[in-house]
Amino acid sequence: MSPQTDARELFQRFDGNPIITSADFPNMVNAVFNPGATEFEGRTLLLLRVEHRTGLSSLAVATSDDGLTGWQIDPTKGLEPDPNLSEECWGIEDPRITRIGEEYYVVYVSYSAFGPLVSLAKTRDFAHWERCGVLQTPEDKDAALFPVTFDGRWALIHRPVPAAAGLGAHIWLSFSPDLHYWGEASTLLTARRGGWWDANKVGLGPPPLLTKDGWLLCYHGVRVTASGSIYRLGLALLDRDDPAKVLARGNEWILGPQATYEQSGDVPDVIFPCGWILRDDGDTLHLYYGAADSVVCVATASLAQLMSHLEVHPFASE
Ligand code: BMA
């Protein structure tokens, strides 16, 4: 059985992967990957990281009726780095979209000359944007907002990197009364050590997804091998009312690079999702991810199966 269609896997890759590549753009771009995802005006909208032939990235929009096929790039929408903002001088990357009321809050990585950091912009139509500034200073990445407040505080998941080498990179949670000033920071999911698939470096994938049992998280673990890093995905569950409380974390990765488009590209062996959409049946989950920092792909899972996986693969620390 080919790894693309292994029925034992929780996520099934779409037969039409990759769904978007650099060839879909009228101008020459190097790569398109790590998409944020949401529903917009009855269609699926992906906010794509486009890496230009300068090496720097901007964000472009593609839409589809069914979330799988017929993708159309919309040249009237998207977000370019602002040349007046020093924190965006080396581009903008890896957007995560959270809908709050009629607005879409996009948390993205700004690439400053002092390292990558976390920025926020909001929009109603993905064409007109209001920048809301820097949320976390360098180095920090892999961030997303919750769509609700907790005791009147907004919550942000993010991944700072300690300045000292060898301490690992871990997932943190911070709170804010106004989406501007952030504090009350604490670690949320820490990287394990040694041989574990999520040793030393972890980071959030898509924004947290509210389920009846709590907030489902998908995170990446980075395993460093003799021939480079492998980016794989795992699951965790946070308390619905207190997101600092981790209710469950899976022991095994649930999706790793196995298809050729995931194993070869600009950065081989990378699966990097920034968006997922739970469909109207309440169970079908579409995960949108960048493969090998080169192309955009989608895989489908059953939410019920993901939740039972968490129950039967409990976390073993260290
Ligand atoms: C991470 C991010 C992602 C990228 C991944 C693999 O640190 O920069 O944008 O997909 O590395 O290169």
Image (cartoon, rainbow, N blue to C red):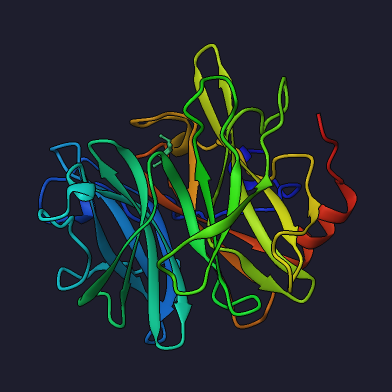
**Residue positioned 62% across, 38% down in the render:** 2
| Residue 81 horizontal/vertical position (percent) | 18, 55
Q: Residue at x 45, y 74 (%)?
A: 178
Image: 257 above or below 151: above
Could you tell me residue 189's position as x and y percent? 68, 46
Nearer-the-camera pick, 164 or 30 = 164
Q: Residue visible at 22% across and 63% down?
A: 79
Q: Is residue 104 left or right of residue 202?
A: left
Closest to the observer, 80 or 242: 242
Is 230 rendered above or below residue 112? above
Quarter of the picture containing the C terminus is top right
Q: Residue at x 71, y 25 (%)?
A: 193
Q: Is there any visible trace of residue 275 in the rendered image?
A: no
Say which quadrant the N terminus sits in.
top right
Quarter of image, ligand 1? top left
Vertical position of residue 51 compared to residue 210: above or below: above
Q: Quadrant of residue 226?
A: top right
Is residue 191 or residue 224 the one in the foreground? 191
Instruction: List x then y, in percent, for residue 33.
Output: 36, 48
Whether residue 264 is situated above or below residue 100 in the rendered picture: above
**Would you say residue 24 is visible in this rendering?**
yes
The quadrant holding residue 135 is: bottom left
> Furthest residue to the right?
312
In the image, is 264 to the left or to the right of 157?
Answer: left
